Image (cartoon, rainbow, N blue to C red):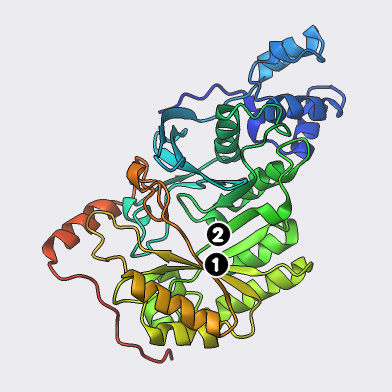
């Protein structure tokens, strides 16, 4: 487990929080901007390297503060250029961060929790159980580590990371304050200066926190939908039992309407063979999303041990996409990236010290089952 020092970790502080910190130690607030640039533009974690700060202040900072990111356990590079970092967080668990290059764009997929408190049936992260929320420093620390590894210092030169998606391990809205703080740093010109359109939070549907999110930040929103009706989504995404589709989509519409600027909701839909990939499912999606400005990402299932699910055929994927296209939707099929290093969507597992024993129970049940998972019979919700 990572040792704590009792010092304030400046890595995870937003600009206002840094200003308050300098106030608290009797220093001018403008020092916050200087230190933020050293941390995020130049990747510096040594106060002695901050040349525009006097020696007395550097000594004061060394006594009361630190700049400490997560420990990098490993870094793997796929044959397609995808990179995956495994980092150890303070709880002792390890989480994963993935970088996906595509043309002139570089997308970093960032984790928010060690494991996941939710239990989506097709996601390997969820099957690891849950250990802890990441701190703001551990969330933004993943961007900090990746940025330094590419030599993108200062951040505005040869920027490798152009987009950040909160789509790694965990449900971001269940670690609300830390994730929001980290996203503010991502967008701050003193941080990474990433456009609000290019920072995306993905949620499985924690409705009250979607409404809270719109009060504090204006990042892009993605919804992990994965089913076009409540009966099927109850099985695949259990939080749907608490926040069914009509309630969930209404909250997403409220969030998007507050953004203006012709922003749209991103719909993520993992295609599972024989479960949610049939023409009737596509037709249901057309009706469900008819009045919602959105773009749809179809994600062919990426297998993992004991999942019980399979990837649909290419013909089934194209058929599903065509139905949505003909209805006027903007639809893309996400290309599987980094599969050779287990970095594909839905494959992130890390090394979670599971407090729930979910992974142990899940594997025991799956080993007793010989039949693949099938879709439930559709029914009307009461």
- Residue 69 location, quadrant: top right
205 or 40: nearer the eye?
Answer: 40
* 143, above or below 276, in the image: above
In the picture, the quarter occupied by the C terminus is bottom left
Kindly report the distance in space between the C-alpha atoms of the residues bearing marks 1 and 2. 6 Å
User: Are circles 1 and 2 on residues that touch, CB within 8 Å?
Assistant: yes
Q: SS of the residue at dot 2?
A: strand
Circle 1 sits in a helix, a strand or a loop, which is it? strand
Residue 269, image x, y percentages = 46, 69
Camera-side residue of 20 and 285: 285
Q: Is residue 36 left or right of residue 208?
A: right
Residue 219: percent from left, percent from top: 69, 57
Q: Quadrant of residue 7?
A: top right
Who comes first in sequence, dot 1 or dot 2? 2
Mark drawn on residue 223: 1
Task: Residue lying at the far top in this picture: please name it.
Answer: 55
Mark 2 crowd level (few <14, some 14–19, many ≥20, 10 Å Cα): many
- Mark 1 neighbour class, 10 Å CA radius: few under 14, some 14 to 19, many 20 or more: some
Work out which quarter of the rendered image holds the N terminus and state it.
Answer: top left
Q: Residue at x 82, y 15 (%)?
A: 52
User: What residue did someone put label 2 on?
Assistant: 202
Residue 99 appearing in the image: yes
Residue 35 falls in image quadrant? top right
282 sits to left or right of 358: right
Numbered circles on residues, count: 2
């Amino acid at each position: 487990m990572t040792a704590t020092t009792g010092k304030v970790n400046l890595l995870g502080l937003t600009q206002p929080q840094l200003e308050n910190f300098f106030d608290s130690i009797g220093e001018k607030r403008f020092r916050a901007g200087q230190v933020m640039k050293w941390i995020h533009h130049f990747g510096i974690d040594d106060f002695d390297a901050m040349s525009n700060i006097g020696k007395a202040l550097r000594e004061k900072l060394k006594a009361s503060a630190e700049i400490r990111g997560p420990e990098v356990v490993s870094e793997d590079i796929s044959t397609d250029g995808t990179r995956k970092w495994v980092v150890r967080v303070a709880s002792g668990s390890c989480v994963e961060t993935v970088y996906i290059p595509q043309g002139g764009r570089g997308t970093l997929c960032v984790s928010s929790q060690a494991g996941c408190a939710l239990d989506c049936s097709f996601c390997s992260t969820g099957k690891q159980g849950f250990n802890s929320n990441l701190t703001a420093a551990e969330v933004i620390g993943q961007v900090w580590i990746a940025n330094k590894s590419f030599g993108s210092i200062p951040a505005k030169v040869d920027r490798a990371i152009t987009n950040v998606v909160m789509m790694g391990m965990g449900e971001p809205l269940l670690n609300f304050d830390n994730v929001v703080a980290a996203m503010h740093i991502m967008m701050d010109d003193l941080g990474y200066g990433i456009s609000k359109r290019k920072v995306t939070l993905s949620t499985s549907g924690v409705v009250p926190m979607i409404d809270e999110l719109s009060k504090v930040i204006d990042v892009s929103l993605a919804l992990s939908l994965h089913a076009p009706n409540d009966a099927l989504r109850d099985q695949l995404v259990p939080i749907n039992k608490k926040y069914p589709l009509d309630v969930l989509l209404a909250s997403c519409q409220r969030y998007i309407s507050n953004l203006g600027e012709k922003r749209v909701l991103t719909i993520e839909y993992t295609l599972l063979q024989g479960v949610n990939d049939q023409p009737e499912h596509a037709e249901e999606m057309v009706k469900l999303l008819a009045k919602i400005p959105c773009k749809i990402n179809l994600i062919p299932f990426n297998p993992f041990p004991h999942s019980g699910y399979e990837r649909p055929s290419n013909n089934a994927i194209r058929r599903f996409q065509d139905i949505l296209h003909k209805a006027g939707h903007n639809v893309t099929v996400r290309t599987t990236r980094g599969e050779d290093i287990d970095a594909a969507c839905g494959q992130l597992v890390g090394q979670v010290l599971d407090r729930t024993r979910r992974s142990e129970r899940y594997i025991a049940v799956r080993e007793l089952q010989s039949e693949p998972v099938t879709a439930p019979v559709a029914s009307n919700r009461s």
